[in-house]
Image (cartoon, grey):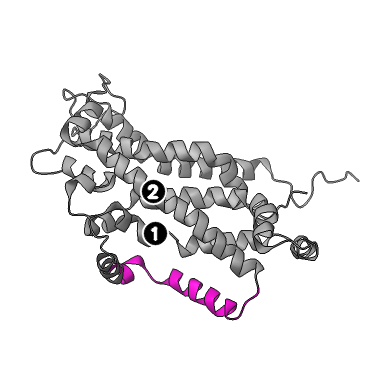
């Protein structure tokens, strides 16, 4: 009798074909809007983008739309404001979420479970529920219409605390107990045992924090009044106003705002996927 090839984990050719077909469909749905915006941003004023059968490839590709964005709004000033906010948010989450996650995962103190439960409860609340109280707090601190006031509410996100808690929990207790026996302090345990084993998750927190701060529109719109302090997402709305309504400029502005996210993800993608599957501990 001929033995069966493969085992329970063997994937048939038909199943592989179905999986790849589904992946291609998801890829098309995800990438198509981005490619269409990129194509629109490269089209000249001579091309009609409202035809019944618009062409995907520009007939006469041009970069004039990107220069037009800079002529219409101070896009680089807005981008610098967004980078400032994103830097504060990323730094706050890397420091605050790391310390909170380590404390909840590795330290024993009274009320730890209650505190962790409160952290989880905040994840259930949508941001719109607390936005009024956040604004009142920021205004009371004298930070209204400032970039620090924009960054402050997102400086420590509860989701990032939960991610860091999960990463620290994956570290075997034996390693932590051995450090305690050797006389290591809490800071030494965090520096020499905790941080080297959660670098992947730190990349995840960095990317999530940066994207959240960079793409945020509602909160900066509420806090900021001075146009000089506008972030890029708020400032780009001037491209779709009474005196400027060129879809090509809007598409070019969208590409400009998307570029830093691509650069950040391309830089940290190796650590990002490691952080998603965090749990493997190096010796």
> What segment carries the magenta color?
108-131
Question: What residue sits 62% from the left and 58% below the top?
Answer: 167
**Element type at marker 2?**
helix
Q: Position of residue 226 (x, y in %)?
A: 17, 50
Say whether residue 130 is magenta: yes
Q: Quick check: 201 above or below 115?
A: above
Say whether residue 40 is magenta: no
Q: Position of residue 54 (x, y in %)?
A: 24, 31
- Nearer to the camera, 198 or 140: 140
- Nearer to the camera, 96 or 219: 96
- Dot placed on the residue nearer the N-terminal end, 2 or 1: 2
Magenta stretch, main secondary structure class? helix
Q: Is 212 displayed left or right of 135 in the figure? A: right
Cβ–Cβ under 8 Å for marks 2 and 1: no
Name which quarter of the figure residue 130 lies in: bottom left
Marks 2 and 1 sit apart, C-alpha to C-alpha, by 9 Å
Residue 86 is marked as 2
Q: Quick check: 157 above or below 258?
A: below
- Nearer to the camera, 5 or 25: 25
Residue 75 is marked as none
The answer to whether any part of residue 31 appears in the image is no
What residue sits right under mark 1 in the picture?
154
């Amino acid at each position: 009798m001929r033995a069966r090839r493969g085992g329970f984990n063997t994937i048939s050719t038909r199943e592989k074909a179905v999986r790849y077909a589904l992946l291609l469909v998801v890829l098309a749905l995800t990438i198509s809007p981005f490619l269409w915006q990129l194509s629109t941003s490269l089209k000249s004023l001579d091309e009609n983008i409202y035809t019944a059968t618009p062409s995907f490839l520009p007939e006469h590709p041009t970069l004039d739309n990107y220069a037009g964005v800079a002529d219409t709004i101070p896009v680089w000033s807005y981008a610098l404001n967004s980078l400032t906010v994103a830097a504060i948010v990323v730094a706050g989450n890397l420091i605050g979420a790391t310390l909170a996650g380590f404390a909840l995962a590795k330290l024993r103190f009274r009320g730890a479970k209650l505190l962790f439960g409160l952290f989880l409860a905040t994840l259930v609340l949508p941001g719109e529920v607390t936005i009024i109280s956040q604004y009142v707090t920021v205004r009371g601190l004298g930070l209204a219409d400032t970039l620090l006031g924009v960054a402050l509410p997102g400086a420590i996100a509860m989701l990032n605390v939960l991610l860091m808690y999960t990463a620290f929990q994956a570290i075997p207790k034996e390693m932590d107990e051995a450090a305690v026996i050797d006389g290591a302090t809490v800071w030494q345990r965090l520096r020499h045992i905790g941080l080297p084993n959660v670098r992947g998750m730190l990349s995840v927190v960095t990317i999530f924090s940066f994207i959240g701060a960079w793409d945020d529109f509602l909160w900066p719109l509420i806090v900021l009044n001075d146009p000089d302090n506008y972030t890029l997402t708020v400032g780009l709305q001037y491209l779709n106003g009474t005196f400027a309504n060129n879809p090509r400029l809007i598409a070019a502005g969208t590409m400009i705002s998307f570029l830093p996210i691509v650069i950040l993800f391309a830089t940290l993608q190796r650590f990002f996927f490691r952080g998603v599957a965090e749990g493997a501990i190096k010796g």
